[in-house]
Image (cartoon, grey):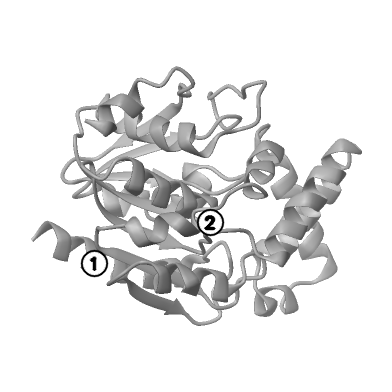
């Protein structure tokens, strides 16, 4: 079986994995420069009430070591699947955010016998000019040792226009400091991978129910890039979160959770 052959690839990453809850399995694929808590922290406790969560950290996040070579999308997808299988979950839905959406799509096409459904949020099949420009600027700033500038770019990118308009200069500096303190070692490698990701040809081969959530206030991934995921996956459902930022705030995440729970319940019925 192709799935088992893929799991045996020698370049699979050994990932630090959060496991929580019981019930139908949910494999979490986080975004670039983020992590399981950063992307899903607002909903982990709720989802764990009736789902078994598997939350692998990408290389350079948490206790997952960063390899010397550039990250590989296939290896990342295979490694996430291995993390679930090694914990006794043969089949699972995948929740992908931002870069994690591309990881989730590749996971579904490489492991069709294991993936039962996809939830893709603020995702993309290939980096649009805004995202590609941000990723390349992060690489340049990192090489120059400008970590605070990287944190500033990340802060301004993941908030919506309305959120930024309500912030004072002091608020912005406080947010930048928080992002700087939380930036993982692997963030530059994640964004370098973004410049090479292209799962457009995968979309037509996704055969599982898919929910695509579009935060319409996203300033890092153009909302139209996320909508294109829905157009490319036959039978997918499009959910728009009006004004939502790239990283969903508490209110938008609660709205997201309502729809995701309904979607997952339909798959598990």
Residue at 66% over, 80% down:
162
Res 238 quadrant in image: bottom left
Q: Residues within 10 Å of mark 2 (few under 14, many from 20)?
A: many
Residue displayed at 67% across by 36% down: 189
Q: Is residue 29 visible?
A: yes
> Left or right: 64 with respect to 207?
right
Residue 263, numbered circle: 1
- Furthest residue toward top: 10
Q: Locate residue 158, reporting x and y percent.
A: 65, 62
Residue 2 percent across, percent down from the top left: 27, 32
Which image quarter: residue 240? Answer: bottom left
Residue behind mark 2 = 98
Q: Is residue 222 left or right of residue 74?
A: right
**Labels 1 and 2 touching (C-beta < 8 A):** no
Q: Residue at x 38, y 45 (%)?
A: 28
For residue 231, the mark is: none
Residue 209 position in % (x across, y down): 25, 63
Q: Is residue 39 above or below residue 70?
A: below
At a point 33% along the width and 34% down the height, the residue shown is 81
């Amino acid at each position: 079986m192709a799935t088992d052959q893929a799991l045996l690839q020698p370049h699979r990453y050994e990932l630090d994995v959060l496991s929580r809850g019981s019930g139908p399995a949910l494999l979490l694929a986080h975004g670039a420069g983020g992590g399981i808590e950063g992307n899903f922290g607002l909903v982990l406790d709720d989802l764990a009430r009736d789902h078994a969560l598997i939350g692998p950290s990408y290389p350079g996040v948490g206790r997952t070591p960063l390899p010397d070579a550039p990250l590989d999308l296939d290896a990342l997808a295979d490694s996430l699947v291995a993390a679930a299988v090694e914990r006794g979950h043969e089949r699972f839905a995948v929740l992908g955010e931002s870069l994690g959406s591309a990881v989730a799509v590749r996971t579904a096409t490489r492991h069709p016998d294991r993936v039962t459904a996809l939830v893709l949020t603020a995702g993309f099949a290939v980096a649009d000019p805004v995202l590609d420009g941000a990723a390349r600027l992060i690489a340049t700033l990192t090489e120059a040792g400008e970590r605070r500038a990287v944190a500033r770019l990340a802060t301004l990118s993941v908030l919506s226009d309305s959120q930024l308009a309500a912030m004072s200069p002091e608020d912005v500096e406080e947010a930048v400091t928080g992002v700087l303190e939380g930036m993982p070692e692997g963030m530059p490698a994640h964004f370098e991978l973004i410049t090479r990701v292209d799962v457009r040809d995968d979309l037509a081969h996704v055969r599982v129910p898919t929910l695509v959530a579009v935060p319409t206030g996203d300033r890092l991934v153009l909302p139209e890039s996320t909508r294109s995921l829905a157009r490319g996956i036959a039978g997918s459902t499009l959910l728009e979160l009006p004004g939502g930022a790239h990283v969903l705030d508490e209110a938008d995440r609660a709205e997201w959770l309502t729809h995701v729970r309904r979607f997952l319940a339909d798959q598990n019925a």
